[in-house]
Image (cartoon, grey):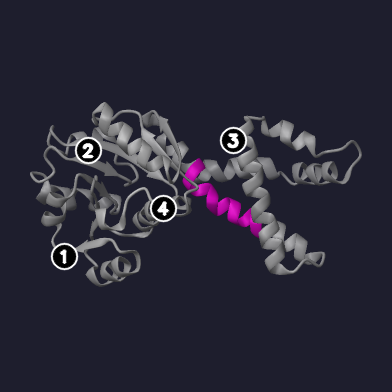
Amino acid sequence: MTKIGFIGMGNMAKAIVRGFILKDAVPPENILAYAPSQEKLKEFAGETGIISYAVLDKMIQDSDIILIAVKPDQIEEVITPVKELLKNKVLLSVAAGWDYDKYDSLLDASTRHLFIMPSTPVQIGEGISLFEQKHSLTADEFETVEKLFSTIGLVQVLPGNLMSIGGTVSACTPAFLGIVIEAIADGGVKHGLPRDAAYKLASQVLIGTGKTQLETGQHPGEMKDAVCSPGGLTIQGVVSLENDGFRAAIIRALDASVKK
């Protein structure tokens, strides 16, 4: 079975690993990892059953697919010393801004690479992974990687020029929705709901609404209209949101978060 080697084990890498294990996509013994912080890596390996490495070169040699998950400003210093070892390997990268063209100028021509942008809910199998349309994987390799990430959420292929806004929508909005969940729960608590019940109800509403849209393809406006009876309570709440600029506030939040 394919062995996946992780370079770096921060929050995103841990989320991917947890998702793979949760969904039985990759057995823990086929997940290899190297990180400068050996103590933290060994602790995580002990928790999950993955294989930790103290030497990066050895981990690369033992891996079929390499996933690099270090900070963008560390990419060159990490890649340069192991450039030869990455020859004829598949390299996946989650480093923001490191698209196909940037890697192509850094890697050997035989290293096949793909820029991906997962979101943290991949850890429970409900994430989004954006794949850059331009890549150098073979058709079989791309299919393997796509199937792998499909086990932990939705895979969406986008042109390079749309990866930034796609990443903002998929990776930044969990923070926005966390505020929405908290606000809905606060409103429930204000009117007497216990805090834990209010959180559960608010979170489940978002899950159910999102899944309904994905599975039916129904326009969000139609979904809104379906629960807004003429003269009813829900439409009064919708009007209040519109008067307070709710829709525009979310668009402005995306404008502020997108990396040009």
Dot 3 or dot 4: first in sequence order is 4
Quadrant location of the C terminus in the rendered image: top left
Mark 2, other Cα within 10 Å: few <14 / some 14–19 / many ≥20: many
Question: x and y percent of residue 238 in the render?
Answer: 78, 43
Report whether 57 appears left or right of 239: left
Q: Which residue is mark 2?
A: 103
The answer to whether residue 190 shows anywhere in this view is yes
The kind of residue tagged 3 is Leu
Residue 115: which disc? none
Residue 19: which disc? 4
Dot 4 or dot 1: first in sequence order is 4
The kind of residue tagged 4 is Gly
Residue at left 39%, top 30%?
161
Q: In the displayed image of the protein, which residue is found farthest to the right?
A: 231
Dot 2 or dot 4: first in sequence order is 4
Question: Which is closer to the viewer, label 2 or label 1?
Answer: 1
Residue at left 62%, top 42%?
210
Q: Residues under labels 3 and 1: Cα distance?
A: 43 Å
Q: Which residues are magenta?
A: 169-182
